[in-house]
């Protein structure tokens, strides 16, 4: 698996210009989005939250004998989510539960903080009473939740994070490992997808981003998207940006996008930081009568997949692999129980998705065929 690296500098300049990940500024050039998207689909992120070198998830494995050793421990695990109810969270939990079952690990709790840090702290406190051996989690706020995770670590709980980690906790010391998609790549891919949909004439676009600037995953998407546009598509101009904090991400995004469309009549496209805010952007476009608006986003949720299949507003999605990510997190829980050495930052590549490959992408992401409401939406 390739990473964004100096050794690929020459090839990157000829294709997608991935030198942006190295912090190198090059002259603005119009790259071929299709070629760029092929490259980013094989890339790992440049680094983890603490600068950790990414290790491909394909390297995380347990032998049959090791799984038997894990089973003998009769361990317990808790899944502490930042928020649930969306397709990404459900797939993560399903992947975790499936692999924990294989290893004989009992899942004693699955919590949903509704993207509220105080609720997540309370969830962790409640879970700790049940004495789990493993906690798999994504912090809602890397500062506000820190003490709760530190308490869990001091009690001997093995913690695996889902991409984001609390400030001040040391990988390999306070927590065991961190499993993430290529979130920088999510931004890169969704930018090239926007350029591809806009065509050679480009145009003015807006961005609806996550206002939590210390949330590593969504911040990386924002940085990656902007870097691509600044360095490689001079005919595309970002003329409006609005951050949203949630927890009503659909409503907040609808308001933000509506304001952009009102004040920027020439706006041709809007990027949304993930699929749930993208649903709000779709609603704003409908309300404004902007059937021609182009939307790209991250996460192949069912609603954006249906819209894309219909040939609607959503022209491209950088799809993550939440089910596979959950399986990897569970395997690392097994590593932790066995005292087996593991990398502190593990990553999965992303899947650039358009209407042309949405059914195949769905199967890769969720390990099942696309549901009827998506397949029947294909025109």
Image (spheres, rainbow, N blue to C red):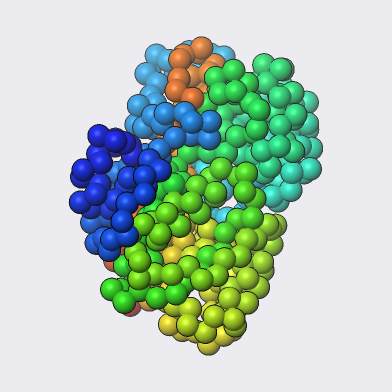
Name of the residue lying farthest toward the bottom: 289
Q: Is residue 80 above or below residue 295?
A: above
For the C terminus, the quadrant is bottom left
Q: Nearer the viewer, residue 196 or 148?
A: 196
Out of 210 and 297, give the one closest to the viewer.
Answer: 210
**Location of the N terminus (image quadrant):** top left
In percent of width and height, residue 183 lies at 46, 46
Residue in view at x 20 percent, y 51 percent: 14
Q: Is residue 136 above or below residue 254?
A: above
Residue 221 as seen in the image, left or right of residue 136: left
**What x and y, as percent, mark residue 19?**
32, 45
Q: Residue sitting at 57 percent across and 59 percent down? A: 209
Q: For the image shown, how many numbered marks are present on the structure?
A: 0
Using the image, determine if residue 342 lies above or below residue 281: above
Residue 64 appears in view: yes
Location of residue 162 in the rendering, given as x and y in whole percent from the top left corner: 54, 37
Image quadrant where residue 131 sits? top right
């Amino acid at each position: 698996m390739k990473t964004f690296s100096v050794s690929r500098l020459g090839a990157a300049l000829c294709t997608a210009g991935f030198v942006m990940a190295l912090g190198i500024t090059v002259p603005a050039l119009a790259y071929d989005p299709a070629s760029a998207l092929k490259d980013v689909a094989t890339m790992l992120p440049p680094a983890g939250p603490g600068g950790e070198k990414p290790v491909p998830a394909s390297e995380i494995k347990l032998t049959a004998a090791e799984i038997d050793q894990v089973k003998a421990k009769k361990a317990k695990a808790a899944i502490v989510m930042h928020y649930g109810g969306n397709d990404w969270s459900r797939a993560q939990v399903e992947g975790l539960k499936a692999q924990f079952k294989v290893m004989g690990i009992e899942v004693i709790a699955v919590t949903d903080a509704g993207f509220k840090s105080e609720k997540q702290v309370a969830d962790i406190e409640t879970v700790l009473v049940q004495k789990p051996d493993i906690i798999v989690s994504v912090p809602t706020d890397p500062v506000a939740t820190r003490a709760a995770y530190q308490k869990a670590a001091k009690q001997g709980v093995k913690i695996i994070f889902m991409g984001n980690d609390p400030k001040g906790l040391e990988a390999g010391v306070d927590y065991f490992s961190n499993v993430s998609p290529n979130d920088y790549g999510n931004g890169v891919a969704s930018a090239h997808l926007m350029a591809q949909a806009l065509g050679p004439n480009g145009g003015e676009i807006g961005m609806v981003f996550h206002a939590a600037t210390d949330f590593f995953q969504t911040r990386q998407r924002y940085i990656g998207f902007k870097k691509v546009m600044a360095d490689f598509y001079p005919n595309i101009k970002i003329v409006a940006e609005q951050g949203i904090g949630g927890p009503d991400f659909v409503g907040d995004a609808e308001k933000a996008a509506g304001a952009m469309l009102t004040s920027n009549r020439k706006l041709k496209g809007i990027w949304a930081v993930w699929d749930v805010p993208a649903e709000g952007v779709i609603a704003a476009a409908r309300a404004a009568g902007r059937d021609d608006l182009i939307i790209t986003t991250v996460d192949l949720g069912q609603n954006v997949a249906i819209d894309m299949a219909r040939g609607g507003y959503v022209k491209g999605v950088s799809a993550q692999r939440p089910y596979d990510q959950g399986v990897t997190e569970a395997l690392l829980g097994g590593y932790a129980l066995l005292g087996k050495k593991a990398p502190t930052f593990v990553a999965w590549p992303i899947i650039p998705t358009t209407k042309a490959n949405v059914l195949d992408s769905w199967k890769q992401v969720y390990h099942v065929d696309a549901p009827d409401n998506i397949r029947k939406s294909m025109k």
